[in-house]
Amino acid sequence: MMQRTVNTALSVLALLAVAATMALAAQLMSVQVRTGQLRDKPGFLSRVVAELPYGDKVEFKGENGDWRQVKASRDGKTGWMHVSALTEQEIILNPTDKDVEAAANSDELALAGKGFNKQVEEQYKKETRLDYSQVDKMEKIVVPQQYVQEFIQVGRLAKGGEQ
């Protein structure tokens, strides 16, 4: 009887360990920048395989320093994203006035690109009276990935897209 109880307890512990491992393996994260670049290798100079919009969910698969290997929920592509482009927090894409008011009063606004939307920006402008015109201009600058790759090759910045 004692052996049976011990075996049952060990089986339950083993199942809990497997469940915990699966839960960690399926950890969801969100893209917290306007456009997150999913790369084929962990490095800023590696090839971009997909661009994920703000708020997209990704499944955590592994890590290499400050890089996270993730699987995109949208199309199932797997690649690497820098930790600064991801958050474990849920991102609210259509916030209510209450959400906006709470965000406008939080310290996270200092991090500008994290959860910053038009409503939050307007509320923050009212409270701080800062001029965002130069930021708006910079946000409109888009450098095609083809130009970036050409720049890397011509400048011999890295071999094979590695850091």
Image: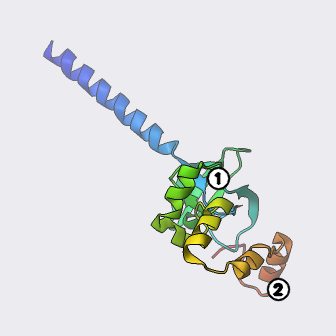
Question: Dot 1: what SS?
Answer: loop
Q: Dot 2 lies on which element?
A: helix
Residue 163 horizontal/vertical position (percent): 63, 76
Please state the horizontal and vertical placement of residue 93, each as a whole percent of the image. Answer: 64, 50
In this rendering, position of residue 104 left or right of residue 74: left
Name the residue: 67% across, 44% down.
73
Alpha carbon separation for disc pair 2 and 1:
34 Å
Q: Quadrant of residue 8?
A: top left
Which one is earlier in the sequence, the residue at label 2 or at label 1? 1
Position in image of residue 105 (x %, y %) = 48, 64
Q: Is residue 29 above or below residue 123?
A: above
Question: In the image, is residue 53 above or below residue 154?
Answer: above
Along the line of sight, the residue nearer the viewer: 147 or 33: 33
Left-right relation of 91 to 77: left
**Quarter of the image holding residue 14?**
top left
Please give the residue where the numbered disc 1 appears in the rendered image.
Answer: 55
Q: Is residue 155 above or below residue 27?
A: below
Q: Residue at x 72, y 84 (%)?
A: 157
Would you name the residue on which mark 2 appears? 154
Which of the two marks, 2 or 1, is nearer to us in this view?
A: 1
At label 1, the amino acid type is Gly
- Extreme bottom residue here? 155
Q: Visible in this render: residue 158? A: no
Q: Residues within 10 Å of mark 2 (few under 14, many from 20)?
A: few
Amino acid carrying label 2: it is Val
68 or 92, which is in the foreground?
Answer: 92
